[in-house]
Amino acid sequence: MLGETRYQYLVSYVVNDRVAIDAGCLGFGFPLAAQKLVTDLFLSHCHLDHVATLPIFLDNVFEYGPECVVVHGSEQTLSVLQQDVLNDRLWPDFVSLSTPSSAFLKLHELAASKPVTVGEMQVTPLPLIHVVPVFGFLIEDPTSAVAIISDTHHGSDVWTHLARVPNLKAVLLECSFPDRLDWLADKARHLIPRSFAAEIQSLPTSVRVIAIHIKPAWYEAVVDELLALGLPNIEIGQTGTEYQF
Ligand SMILES: [Zn+2]
Ligand SMILES: [Zn+2]
């Protein structure tokens, strides 16, 4: 998440240096040296708060040669990326410009619940419920497992999957709107504190639950309502912070 502010404007996470989840602020908010270490970028979906700096990131880390970043996403996400972003209008078509000897990126289509191995990590895409197809991600390494669940509405079966994960240390879960905007959360398919609490009911309280994707316009109200739930394992995600699990 982008530093210098408590507001969570844009979405990007880097895990164990190599894996990035979403590119909302990856190309602007992370030091260039950190961007260059990323080998695999997983996209949850193609909404702008999750891909806004993707072209800049690809530009930043490009080096002449066959090695390049692998961008993982659903068929729909990769198609939007090619048709609406890397389309030679908004940004050069980096896919067509890539050749075996010099590539900007490689695209890899994700299949639901099929893990991808990156070094010592396994990244498993888990289908969520939103206005477009979305994957949450379970990231496991030899010591711990963490899930990033965003964007989502209530009712996905991601919690059944997570209940079976040994070593689950934390879930980063979206909470976009305050309770009084339940009608908007239903239309835009996001969570509010009330549905957020219902979603995590089946998780053991030993699992840290970190609230993310809080819309800046309602940040204070959402934070107050989340803390008023009185659940001991809920934290508010801090931008620009390195978490250890
Ligand atoms: Zn979205
Ligand atoms: Zn979003």
Image (cartoon, rainbow, N blue to C red):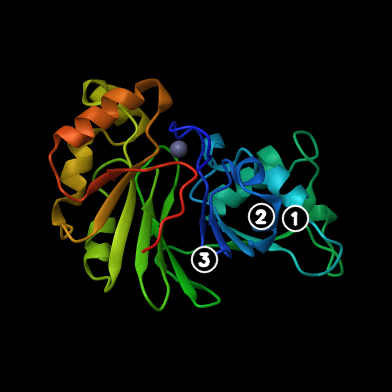
Looking at the picture, tell me which residue is in the foreground, 99 or 61.
61
The answer to whether one can see residue 202 in this image is yes
3D distance between C-alphas at marks 1 and 2: 7 Å
Is 32 situated above or below 222?
below
Kind of residue at disc 1: Val
The image position of residue 56, as x and y in percent, is 72, 43
* 96, above or below 2, in the image: below
On residue 35, which mark appears?
2
Query: Residue sitting at 41 percent across and 37 percent down?
Result: 131
Label 3 SS: loop
Asked whether residue 157 appears in the rendered view, the answer is no
Q: Is residue 138 left or right of residue 81?
A: left
Quarter in which the C terminus is drawn: bottom left
Q: Are marks 1 and 2 in contact (CB under 8 Å)?
A: yes
Image coordinates of residue 190 in percent, x first then y, are 33, 35
Which residue has dot 1 on it?
61
Which numbered disc, 1 or 3, marks the residue closer to the eye?
Answer: 3
Q: Residue visible at 36% across and 62% down?
A: 146
Residue at 61% x, 38% y: name it: 52
Residue 160 is left or right of residue 109, and the answer is: left
* CA distance separating discs 2 and 3: 12 Å
Q: In the image, what residue type sits under mark 3?
A: Asn
- Label located before the other in sequence (2 or 3): 3
Which residue carries the number 3 mark? 16
Which of disc 3 and disc 1 is earlier in sequence?
Answer: 3
